[in-house]
Image (tube, coloured by chain):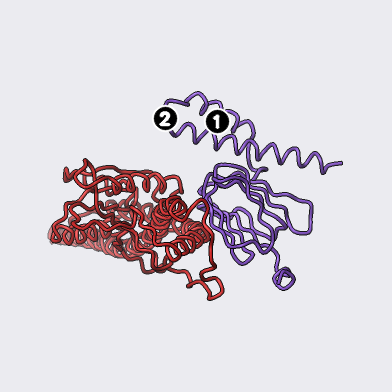
Amino acid sequence: MAVSLREYRARIKSTESMKKITRAMELIAASRIIKAQQRAQQAAPYARELTRAVSAVATFSNVDHPLTKEEENPKRAAVLVITSDRGLAGAYSSSVLKETERLAERLRDEGKEIDYFLAGRKAEAYFKFRSRPFIDSWTGFSDQPTYDKAAEIGRALIEAFLKQQGEEGDVDEVHIVYTRFRSMLVQEPTAVRLLPLEVVEAPEGEAAPAAEDLLPLYEFEPSAAEVLDGLLPQYVQSRIFYSLLQAAASELAARQKAMKAATDNADELIKKLTRIANQARQAGITQEISEIVGGVNALADAQAAAND
Amino acid sequence: MATAAGSEALHVELVAADRTVWSGDAAMVIARTTEGDVGVLRDHAPVLSLLSEAVVEVQVEGTDDVVVAAVDGGFLSVANNRVSILSEHIELGEEIHVEKVKAELEEARGLIGANNEAERRVRRAEARLRAAEKVQSGSLSTGH
């Protein structure tokens, strides 16, 4: 018997308090996730209207815009990695980073160099620990992103994209790696190309516009080109905002799942430790009894020998 | 034709990046585009135009109420009696704290010349101030 009963009891106690913590975190994540989903829903009308407007302009004019122009010989790609600020969310951040590595490999195979832009402390820590260079990072908002943050990230990415090839800090493509929120149980890390823009489909989860909504003959003021000029950057930012919101919902769902597993594990552990502790207690009692009985026998034997 | 389509009210939505600020039926919408003020009535031709940082007024259908909001650029789209006003930030006149905006305006004015952002901030603050003042004067005039 290596460990005494007292030590088992201490371990049970600490596991119990840990269980309380993980249980609390699970409940917090569960309540926040509803808010995160609501935020995503509230942002949907803006994304929908923007998409409609962009498709309207794109349909009625053949305007070439710098943001939609494919570089003939792309050399550099920017990758925006969206992870969480805090851990304890299971494999959430590491699966995003794994997806990033896959994308990076693919891009490198295509002969492109990669500039990293990071969102979330976990990505930053990952890159810093490996002393890998990155261009810029934004942290501190992963579970409740605001539009202003998305706009800030968007501006940085657009600026890098609009630079001429050969210029310092120029990129020819922009990719985003984020976690798509499919359901409470399924969140998948996804890599999408953001720039150059291809305006083809509404963001995921929205129905296609009904037939009567399609293509009224718009007039553009001041001109189609200028309207597009105003729209596209906002469209890019709204796409980034959408990714951030999805990532936030996914993070919370992942945390809830991870904390549920941790609570269950703690339960198991407590059960196991209680059994072992009981066994130890029993063993202790048995030993004491046999010691007493042995002692009594020895005494009786000694007395009998003396009487003889 | 006007009678056929006229039965349909003008549906207006003020949509900010993170929420729908206001939506409902309106008699008229007045907004300021980069080309100048524009008023939108029922059966307006489809139009898509850029807004400047200014005040948007919506006269609510069937009442004398006017919804006043400050927009931060963005754009206006009109089609099939639906008006959408999209902007990164939209604030209703009654949500705006006059004192805060005044402080913001002072600060931004002090920064003018330092960077390009300052001028934009001044315009934004001015628009918000105007929206707030319009709401206040509006509530006074309907008060008696």
Q: Position of residue B11 (x, y in %)?
A: 65, 62
Q: Which residue is mark 1?
A: B104
Q: What chain letter is assigned to the residue under label 1? A: B
- Residue nearest the observer in this picture, A137 or A126: A137
Residue A70 in the image: above or below residue A200:
above
Q: Are marks 2 and 1 in contact (CB under 8 Å)?
A: no
Q: Is residue A20 visible?
A: no
**What's the residue type where badge 1 is placed?**
Glu
Q: Is residue A194 visible?
A: yes
Shown in red, the chain is A
Q: Position of residue B85 (x, y in %)?
A: 57, 54
Task: Tell me which residue sits at (80%, 39%) in the image.
Answer: B140
Residue A34 in the image: above or below residue B16:
below
Query: Residue pushed farthest bottom?
Result: A211
Q: Residue B26 appears in which quarter of the rendering?
A: bottom right
Task: Tell me which residue sits at (51%, 53%) in the image.
Answer: B18
- Residue nearest the observer in this picture, A240 or A75: A75
Q: Position of residue B78 (x, y in %)?
A: 59, 60
In the rendered structure, find residue A207 and report the number of the disc placed on it.
none
**What's the residue type where badge 2 is placed?**
Asn
User: Which circle's residue, 2 or 1, is located before the other in the chain?
Assistant: 1
Residue A71 in the image: above or below residue B90:
below
Q: Which residue is mark 2?
A: B115
Residue B94 in the image: above or below residue A13:
above
Shown in purple, the chain is B
| Residue B139 located left or right of residue B31 | right
